[in-house]
Amino acid sequence: MTDPHPWERQPGESLQAWRAFVAYRDMRNRSLVKVAEQLGESRQLMDRWSSRHQWVARVSAWETEQDRDWARQLTAARRHIAKRHVQTAQAFLTKAVERLNELNPALLSPADTVKWAEFALKVERGIYGLGDDPEEGAASVGGVRIVIDPRLLPVDSNLAAVDDDSND
């Protein structure tokens, strides 16, 4: 049989003493006097139980476990949110690419053509760490921050041409 966690009832601890510990453990502003009043017991008895059963150390262990549990929950929630955001972004990007493929360039105004070109150039420069953003692989366009890891991009003939130019 495994030893109980410090915040659980300990071997040799009476049910009354353990209930007093739980009352103390769960108080917002812990006080042996308040526990004694709450349970209708003497302060001296609370002092003895607290000392004998190491209430302060057990509460510390309890708080540490609660912090660990909260951190696990936050991590799981953040992962869930990040996954949902990626799925949403992918769905939006798919729709945007579909719409882009439907566009007739001849119908774009000169101003729209310039906006599209600026957007594409900012994204491309951001991918290769050439953007105005100090963070490599990032660009901000119209208040939208775009971060793309260039290691995830396919190597194509345009990159080969860039590499060939560097040998001149």
Image (spheres, rainbow, N blue to C red):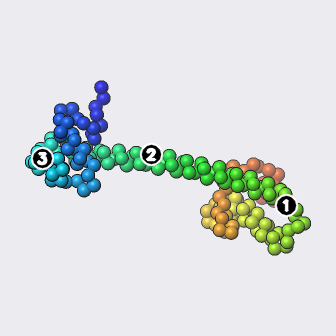
Q: Quadrant of the N terminus?
A: top left
Q: What residue is rendered at 72% in x and 50% in y? A: 153
Cα distance in 3D space between marks 1 and 2:
47 Å
Q: Residue furthest top?
A: 1
Give the x, y percent position of residue 102.
Answer: 84, 57
Q: In the picture shown, does residue 23 fall above or below 12?
A: below
Under mark 1, the amino acid is: Leu
Decide if residue 136 is on the left or right side of residue 70: right
In the picture of the structure, the residue carrying the numbered disc 1 is: 103
In the picture of the structure, the residue carrying the numbered disc 3 is: 41
In terms of sequence position, does the residue under pointer 1 or pointer 2 come before the other? 2
- SS for tag 2? helix
Give the x, y percent position of residue 111.
Answer: 81, 73
Q: What residue is rendered at 72% in x and 62% in y? A: 123
Under mark 3, the amino acid is: Glu
Q: What residue is rendered at 27% in x and 55% in y? A: 28
Question: Residue 72: which disc?
Answer: 2
Whether residue 63 is visible: yes
